[in-house]
Structures are given as structure tokens and as C-alpha cells.
Image: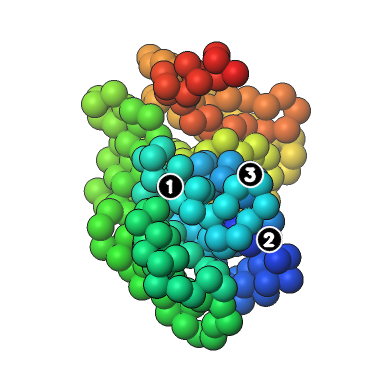
């Protein structure tokens, strides 16, 4: 069963931690951010299935964050959570790109029902594929392609690639990969993981640019999201 990952952007730490605890009890993985700037950067990773977003945040307000995420092309569902309950604010929130709007105070059962509804909606739309750059992994027929070329993977290579693509731009240790992909703990001296990384590189990286699988010396590996041209231009101007 796929574990859903939720990002909670809420400056009231007690509230954020309560939501985190409640969702984790429902089997979800939850990350938290307590200000707008940090929340925006985490959300842009595209590494979450849903975002719970407060409006009154320090640094960047929720409306600005929602609008910027949609402008960047992120399709992750957004549930706005705020004490501002006027019709005008609800309209502005939904117009900014949010998918639903919940006002404080709220019953956790209602929040959970709204989150489930949003997750069901996105699942029914398209959670059958993972895509990073020109690499596409189809979860239904277990096919992989890069730059339009089909890539033949073994079952273990497919599982390893899937885990990488679900955790882009994260440093993943060999211990983490052994527990999550092989579901067992390997002796730290074993080279099994390194061998499979090499197999995967030969098939999805060797003939293509940019390279996606990177070694973090002494720690493990990272699956890097490619930098698009527009990002490169923006970084050059800074």
C-alpha cells in the first residue's frame, strides 16, 4: 500500500505538531514547516501528495505560496487552513490555486475527511506514473522510459528506481535503501546496493544527460531533479 506524504505549513507550532501527530496515526508521512519561505521551498520539491497550508504565515503568506506553486506547474492538492472565514477570503484562496478551504477552529475528523477526498481525487486522476525530467516510471504496467526510449529493468531495479523517484533531492544512505527497498538490514560492508546502483546507472543514466543518480561520498546516493532552463536563467540573474 502506498504511503501518502503530507506537508503541513503552519506557523503555530503546537497546531502543526497536533496535525502531524494525527495524520501519522492514520498511516501518513508528515513534514512540517513553520514559516512561508521554508514551506515554499519544501513544497517546490514536489515530494508530497498533499499540502495543508495556513494563510497567515511569516515570510510568505499562504495565498502567495499557493499562487507561486501553481505558477511553477506543481499540481499537488492544497488544503488551506485558516481562521479567516469570510467569503471573500475563501474565494481568494480558491482562486490562488488551492483545492479546498477549512476554517479554524475545526474538527480533526472533518480535516481528515477533506484530505482523504483530495487524495482520492488525485489518485483517480493520475498517480499511475512518476516522472522526473524525461524519465517516466509507470506503476501499473511497470514500464520505464527515458527520453522516449523504453528501459528494461528487473523487479529489484524497478523498486530501487521507484524509491529514488519518490524521494528526489534527498540523501539516501545505503542503510535506508536496504531497509526500504530490500526490507532487510545489510551488513555495512556488503556491495549489493552499490552493484544495483551501477546496474541502474547503466540503464537510465549512462547514455543520457543530465545525470540523475549521484554519489554522495561517504554517505550514500541522491536522485537529483534536473534544473530546467528557466531555473538556470533565474539563478544566473540572482
Judged from the image, the secondary structure of the residue bearing numbered disc 2 is loop
Specify whether 121 is left or right of 92: left
- Whether residue 176 is visible: no
Looking at the picture, does residue 189 appear above or below residue 23? above
Q: Position of residue 146 (x, y in %)?
A: 31, 27
Q: Pointer 1: what residue?
A: 67
Q: Residue at x 75, y 28 (%)?
A: 218
Q: Residues within 10 Å of mark 2 (few under 14, many from 20)?
A: many
Q: Residue at x 51, y 48 (%)?
A: 65
Looking at the picture, does residue 215 appear above or below residue 76? above
Q: Are marks 2 and 3 in contact (CB under 8 Å)?
A: no
Q: Position of residue 121 (x, y in %)?
A: 30, 65
Q: Residue at x 68, y 72 (%)?
A: 15
- Whether residue 175 is visible: yes
Classify residue 19 by image quadrant.
bottom right
Looking at the picture, does residue 125 appear above or below residue 101? above
CA–CA distance between discs 2 and 3?
Answer: 11 Å
* N-terminal label among 2 and 1: 2
Q: Pointer 2: what residue?
A: 11
CA–CA distance between discs 3 and 1?
Answer: 14 Å
Residue 37 bears which disc, if any?
A: 3
Specify whether 98 is left or right of 63: left
Q: Residues within 10 Å of mark 1 (few under 14, many from 20)?
A: some
* N-terminal label among 3 and 1: 3
Classify residue 29 by image quadrant.
bottom right
Q: Nearer the viewer, residue 199 or 150?
A: 150
Judged from the image, the secondary structure of the residue bearing numbered disc 1 is helix
Q: Are marks 2 and 1 in contact (CB under 8 Å)?
A: no
Looking at the picture, does residue 213 appear above or below residue 67? above
Q: Residue at x 55, y 60 (%)?
A: 55
Amino acid at each position: 500500500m502506498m504511503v501518502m506524504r503530507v506537508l503541513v505549513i503552519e506557523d503555530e507550532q503546537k497546531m502543526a505538531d497536533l496535525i502531524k501527530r494525527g495524520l501519522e496515526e492514520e498511516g501518513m508521512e508528515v513534514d512540517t514547516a513553520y514559516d512561508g519561505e521554508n514551506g515554499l521551498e519544501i513544497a517546490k520539491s514536489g515530494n508530497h501528495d498533499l499540502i495543508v497550508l495556513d494563510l497567515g504565515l511569516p515570510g510568505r503568506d499562504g495565498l502567495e505560496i499557493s499562487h507561486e506553486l501553481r505558477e511553477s506547474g506543481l499540481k499537488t492538492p492544497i488544503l488551506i487552513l485558516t481562521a479567516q472565514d469570510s467569503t471573500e477570503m475563501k474565494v481568494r484562496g480558491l482562486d490562488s490555486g488551492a483545492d479546498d478551504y477549512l476554517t479554524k477552529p475545526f474538527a480533526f475528523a472533518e480535516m481528515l475527511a477533506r484530505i482523504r477526498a483530495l487524495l482520492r481525487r488525485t489518485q483517480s486522476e493520475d498517480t499511475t506514473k512518476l516522472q522526473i525530467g524525461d524519465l517516466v516510471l509507470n506503476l501499473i504496467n511497470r514500464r520505464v522510459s527515458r527520453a522516449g526510449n523504453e528501459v528494461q529493468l528487473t523487479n529489484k531495479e524497478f523498486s530501487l528506481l521507484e524509491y529514488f523517484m519518490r524521494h528526489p533531492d534527498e540523501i539516501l544512505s545505503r542503510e535506508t535503501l536496504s531497509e526500504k527497498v530490500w526490507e532487510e538490514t545489510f551488513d555495512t560492508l556488503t556491495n549489493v546496493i552499490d552493484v544495483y546502483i551501477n546496474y541502474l546507472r547503466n540503464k537510465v543514466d549512462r547514455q543520457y544527460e543530465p545525470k540523475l543518480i549521484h554519489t554522495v561520498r561517504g554517505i550514500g546516493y541522491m536522485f537529483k531533479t534536473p534544473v530546467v532552463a528557466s531555473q538556470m536563467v533565474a539563478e544566473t540573474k540572482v
